[in-house]
Image (cartoon, grey):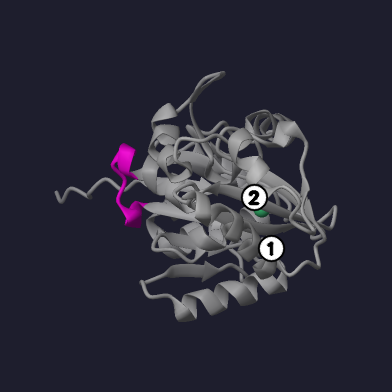
């Protein structure tokens, strides 16, 4: 008898408008139940990757009756938690790894450097943390100009930062996050993936919006759910055409089992595309 090698999957998904059906498009009936069936398979390790902070992520899990993750990457990659039962353990190794990008400063020390940039309004303190500074802006803003203005303030101080722009669809508000250069959804996923010993091929990232683009268009297998906004799809297409590294982005759309490719159904379509063997897992 031939032994089939063990397959496993490190499934990393964004929440809002990727797994959570909280956009304009209705959710395919039964999609989240199928997702739950998939992630309950012992070969699957589930991570949520979101711009939400820890309390907001836990609220979403409760409100939408989502399966509990093993790992939680919050604050657009600025914080990571290992989840055991009801306990979320902050993974300080990650914060230690990214601290040098801000020369050991925390966001309360970096914020004064960004004071007075036209078009940026600081979000409430609950949205800020040690390694994340968040602002609101007009959704029609020139995001490239805002990014350049932020970096121009930080570079002279030796602060290496990533600036992430996204648009909150339902509230129609622009959001600009400033993180240590090494802190992003993609880098955080890679940090956990390496720690757990998953290969890139055993990994999948699912997302829908601006702060997912780096991870969607990076070296890991990825899926853009079909309900993503057209401009996100266009930008993802542009990025993978111009990428200097191999990319593996799948655009969900046809769907599986008659469910279409929106939200959880899109995630499952991506799983089937990149990991066809997982079809027997749900
Ligand atoms: Mg999202």
Image quadrant assignment for residue 10 = top left
Count every numbered label the image shows and give the total: 2
Residue beneath the point at 41% across and 40% down:
100
Return the x and y of residue 157 as percentages of the image width and height: 51, 49
Q: Is residue 236 above or below residue 25?
A: below
Which residue does the image show at 69% across and 58% down from the upper left?
166
Q: Under 8 Å from ligand 1: the CB of mark 2?
A: no
Residue visible at 67% across and 41% down?
112
> Does the magenta portion include 201?
yes
The region drawn magenta spans: 194-202
- Verify whether residue 177 appears in magenta: no
Dividing the picture into quarters, in which one does residue 65 lie?
A: top right
Furthest residue to the top?
86
Residue on which disc 1 sits = 146
Of labels 2 and 1, earlier in sequence is 1
- Above or below, 69 against 119 in this view is above
* 85, above or below 15, in the image: above
Q: Which residue is nearer to you in this view: 272 or 179?
A: 179
**Badge 1: few (under 14), some or many (20 or more) residues near its Cα, within 10 Å?**
some
Foreground residue among 152 and 41: 152
Spot occupied by residue 185 in the image (x, y as percentages of width and height): 51, 49
Answer left or right for 191 relative to 28. left
Residue extending farthest to the front is 156
Observer-nearest residue: 136 or 50? 136
Left or right, residue 108 beside residue 189: right
Q: Which residue is labeled 2 in the image?
A: 177
Q: In what element is the residue under mark 2?
A: strand
**Picture residue at 18% right of the left edge, 48% below the top:** 3
The residue carrying pointer 2 sits among few (fewer than 14), some (14 to 19) or many (20 or more) residues within 10 Å by Cα, namely many
Nearer the observer, 212 or 125 = 125
Question: Residue 39, position in %: x, y?
Answer: 50, 40
């Amino acid at each position: 008898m031939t032994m089939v090698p063990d397959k496993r999957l490190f499934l990393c998904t964004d929440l809002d408008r990727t797994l959570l059906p909280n956009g304009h498009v209705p959710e395919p009936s039964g999609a989240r139940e199928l997702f739950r069936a998939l992630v309950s398979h012992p070969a699957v390790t589930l991570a949520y990757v979101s711009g939400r902070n820890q309390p907001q992520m836990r609220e979403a899990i409760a409100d939408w009756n989502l399966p509990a993750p093993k790992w939680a990457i919050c604050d657009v990659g600025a914080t990571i938690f290992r989840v055991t039962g009801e306990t979320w353990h902050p993974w300080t190794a990650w914060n230690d790894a990214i601290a040098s990008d801000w020369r050991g400063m925390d966001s309360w020390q970096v914020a004064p450097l960004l004071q007075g940039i036209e078009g940026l309004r600081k979000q409430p303190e609950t949205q800020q943390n040690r390694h994340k500074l968040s602002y609101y802006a007009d959704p029609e803003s020139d995001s490239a100009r805002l990014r350049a203005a932020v970096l121009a303030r930080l570079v002279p101080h030796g602060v290496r930062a990533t600036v992430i722009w996204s648009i909150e669809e339902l509230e129609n508000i622009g959001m600009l996050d400033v993180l240590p250069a090494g802190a992003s959804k993609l880098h955080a996923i890679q940090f956990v993936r390496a720690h757990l010993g998953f290969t890139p091929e055993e990994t999948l990232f699912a997302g829908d919006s601006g702060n997912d683009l780096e991870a969607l268009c990076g070296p890991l297998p990825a899926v853009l759910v079909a309900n993503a906004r057209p401009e996100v799809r266009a930008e993802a297409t542009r990025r993978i055409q111009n990428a200097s590294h191999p990319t593996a982005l799948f655009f969900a759309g046809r769907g599986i089992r008659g469910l279409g490719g929106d939200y959880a159904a899109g995630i499952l379509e991506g799983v089937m595309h990149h990991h066809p063997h997982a079809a027997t897992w749900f």
